[in-house]
Image: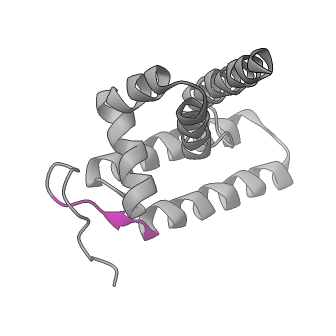
Amino acid sequence: MRQLTSLKKALIALLGFISLALAAAGTLLPLLPTTPFLLLAAGCFMRSSDRLYRWLMSRRWVGTYIRNYREYKALTSFAKLVILIVLWVTITTSILAVSTTWVRLLLVLVALAVSVHILCLKTMAGNGQAHPTHDRD
């Protein structure tokens, strides 16, 4: 029975690493979301290995980003700006790379939806460690 638990934890940790890789790829690839994969990686590591979870959450930007999103549904102004810039640069590059009108339209709609989601999140006050401001209440 103990081996089953160890195997289960190893598979969950593997899923965490795959999710982390997809999150990293999502920073550069349009239509591949970063945040859900980061949250999945954190959840997998939390259930499989305290060491891996502490490692992920101790990463300066990623750990703070995950914590702020999970606890407050908020991001820092800087994170919002970077996300929106990367989103629109990659979407624009993709739009220029395809010639199909409906694909271009779909890319714009996805980018608009993601932009609205990001802009609707609360903005963290100060250094991102404090409670969020209530700028949209």
Which of the pair 24/68 is nearer the observer? Answer: 68
Residue 91 position (above or below residue 118): above
Q: Which of the pair 129/82 is nearer the observer?
A: 129
Please state if 32 lies on the left or on the right of 71 as rendered: right
Whether residue 44 sits left or right of residue 79 in the image: it is right
Q: Is residue 98 magenta?
A: no
Which quadrant of the figure contains the N terminus?
top right
Taking the image as shown, residue 71 lies to the left or right of residue 18, namely: left
Q: Can residue 89 be seen in this view?
A: yes
| Residue at image coords 77%, 56% | 106
Which residue is more in the foreground, 126 or 111? 126
Is 27 placed above or below 83 here?
above
The mark total stands at: 0
The image position of residue 110, as x and y in percent, is 68, 57
Q: Quarter-wise, where is residue 37 in the image? A: top right
Q: Position of residue 116 (x, y in %)?
A: 52, 67
Above or below: residue 106 compared with residue 22: below
Query: Is there any visible trace of residue 82 in the rendered image?
Result: no
The single residue placed furthest to the bottom in the displayed view is 137
Residues shaded magenta: 120-125
Q: Position of residue 75 (x, y in %)?
A: 35, 55
Residue closest to the far front: 1
Would you identify the image quadrant in which residue 12 lies? top right
Residue drawn at (39%, 34%), measured in percent from left and top? 62
Q: What residue appears at the point 32 percent right and 34 percent down from the top-left corner? A: 61
Measuring 61% from the left and 34% from the top, which residue is drawn there?
44
**Location of residue 54 by image quarter:** top left
**In which quadrant is the C terminus drawn?**
bottom left
The image shows residue 33, relative to residue 53, as above or below, that is: below
Q: Where is residue 55 in the image (x, y as percent from the top left)?
A: 40, 22
